[in-house]
Amino acid sequence: MIELENLSVNLRTFRLESLSLRIAPGEFFMIVGPSGAGKTILLESIAGLRSLAGGRVSIRGLDVTPLPPERRNVALVYQEYALFPHMNVERNIRWGLRFAALPDDAHVHRLIDLLKLKPLLGRSPETLSGGEQQRVALARALAVKPSVLLLDEPLSALDPSFREDLRDYLAEINRGGMTLVMVSHDFGEVLSLGNRVAVISDGVLQQVGDVRSVFRAPANRSVAEFVGMKNLFPASIRGTDAVTEGGATLLLGKAAASGERLLGIRPEDVVIGAEHPGDSRNAFQGKVVSIVPRGMAFEVIMRTDGGMRITARVLSSALLSGGVAVGGEYWASFSPDSVHVL
Amino acid sequence: MPRSLRERLFMLSMGSFLLLYILWPLGGLFLRADWSLVASASHDGEVLSALWRSIWTAAAATGVIALFGTPLAYFLARQSFRGKSILEAVIDVPIMIPHTVAGIAVLMAFSPKAPAGALLTSMGFSPVNSNLGIILACMFVSIPFYVDAARDAFYSVSPRTEKVARTLGASFPHVFFRISLPLARKGLISGLIMSWARGVSEFGAIVIIAYHPMVAPTLIYDRFATFGLKYSTPVAVQLILVCLGMFVVLRILAAGKRKEDAEI
């Protein structure tokens, strides 16, 4: 569907470097990375809104690199909606139809029904809530029957309740066969919506793959940090043993190639307890240095006697019943299988 | 007295000094004018033709500025490049220099001895002591007023709105005329008003390149120098009335109906 070949963009303060990607028809493809990674620039490059320093963009097998945005049949929805403020909702939605070879009114009516926009048609965009504006922006984009829908953090500016709604709409639009490419900086969003994901940072593609496999096996430190793998330790590996820089020995679930590698352990795989958990687990004694609330859970940060900083994600209920407190001595443990070698 | 009210009163009383500084002399002009002379001035052919000339030459200058200045303003609002601030400073130069100096510069550039002036003269358009000269002088002093206002107006239009319009199938000119221009409309009209008002009130630059035919400010000066204050005031009152009238009408037009994009 979309093929990017060595795509490069050269701005004064930023470069997107030789990026290659393939996105299949009907896919819900996510592009993630920290802010300033170049995600929006990548989307705008696909849409033809950025001049390329090099590389090619193909859509449906057609090389569109020399084509202006209006001839690529790619629609774009921004985080801040970008509705036309001088037109009412209906005119916004229908604006692109005048350029369509075969304007399909029935299609527009279906969109208006799907996104529940009928009561809003006569309203001016500035009177709408964020969620309503984003639905209008979606309808406007889909009205021209694009071959791909590009979404630039469409959920970020919305209240949580609207976010749920819009997430459902996006999933439904995708089930209808539309190829979606969505930029996000939230890996939770990626897990709930995407089929495949590309992680970029500093204008460089770090990893592409199935969402779950990227989540489970991040390719390097920057991807690991992005997917929330907070415990990262450089170590030298020999068989199923890994010795960290601080001298601690960890047991691996299965033998890995020897050498200097990075170990990653997810905070949710770490258990904090008062007793030594037994020899089958990796266990380190240390002091809790801080407890940080994260939604329905807490992050307990421990410094071990060997100087390792271990972060555990603990459910609020477990934390309260277990009586874990800052300053206390505990055991942090995790199974050898939860140690990932990057 | 509540603190916030006291603060507001303080600011208002300080600011009212300047308001008074504008309104007092202008009000005095109206109060102390000899209204029989004002009335007779409105039948005076010389006064009427000078007023009319002021209006249309300033409008012509503004039209030319809008034609060339709108793309320039859009360019400045959308592009960032090395030397941009120098370019913007150049545009503002006419505000900085004395208007008589501007007049001399324009006169030298368009005198029959200079290439541009020679070309125009050979085509039958003499820039010296002509309507054309007045327009050229007005343009020089009015450019920054329109270009600055138009640039700020385009700044306020989100580039992403324009980008979305492109992806919906619109070409660049279509987006410019259907999205950017209507959204910048208020600021553009206010730039046109400022540019026109600057032209109507111009004296220093015009008097150097074209004392005759007379525009209203030249006529006011001429009457003042020849007959004194009493006979220059009626023309001044007439000019103020015309300017204020135009100003009010254009402001109402600019603030009025926000016409929707009618065509679907």
Image (cartoon, coloured by chain):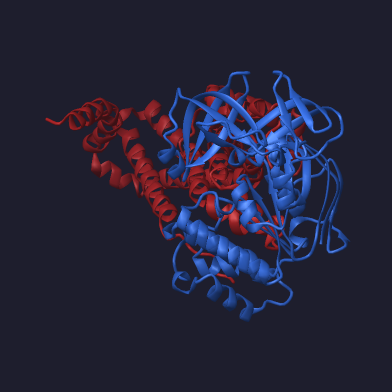
Q: Nearer the viewer, residue B243 or A300?
A: A300
Q: Nearer the viewer, residue B99 or A59?
A: A59
Where does the N terminus of chain B fall, quadrant-wise? top left
Point 69% across, 46% down: residue: A215
Where is residue B161 shown, x and y percent of the image? 60, 53
Labels in figure, total: 0
On screen, residue B216 above or below A23: above
Where is residue B100 shown, x and y percent of the image? 54, 23
Specify the farthest residue to the bottom.
Answer: A106
Q: Nearer the viewer, residue B143 or B153?
A: B153
Q: Is residue B65 left or right of residue B17?
A: right
Point 71% across, 52% down: residue: A211
Q: Is residue A268 visible?
A: yes
Q: Which color was chain B given? A: red
Where does the C terminus of chain B fall, quadrant-wise? bottom right
Where is residue A162 shown, x and y percent of the image? 48, 58
In which quarter of the view is residue A221 placed? Answer: top right
On screen, residue A200 above or below A139: above
Q: Is residue A235 left or right of residue A58?
A: left
Point 60% across, 46% down: residue: A186
Q: Is residue B117 visible?
A: no
- The chain assigned the colour blue in the figure is A
Specify the farthest residue to the front.
Answer: A278
Where is residue B83 shown, x and y percent of the image? 70, 26
Q: Is residue A228 left or right of residue A200?
A: left
Point 57% across, 51% down: residue: A79
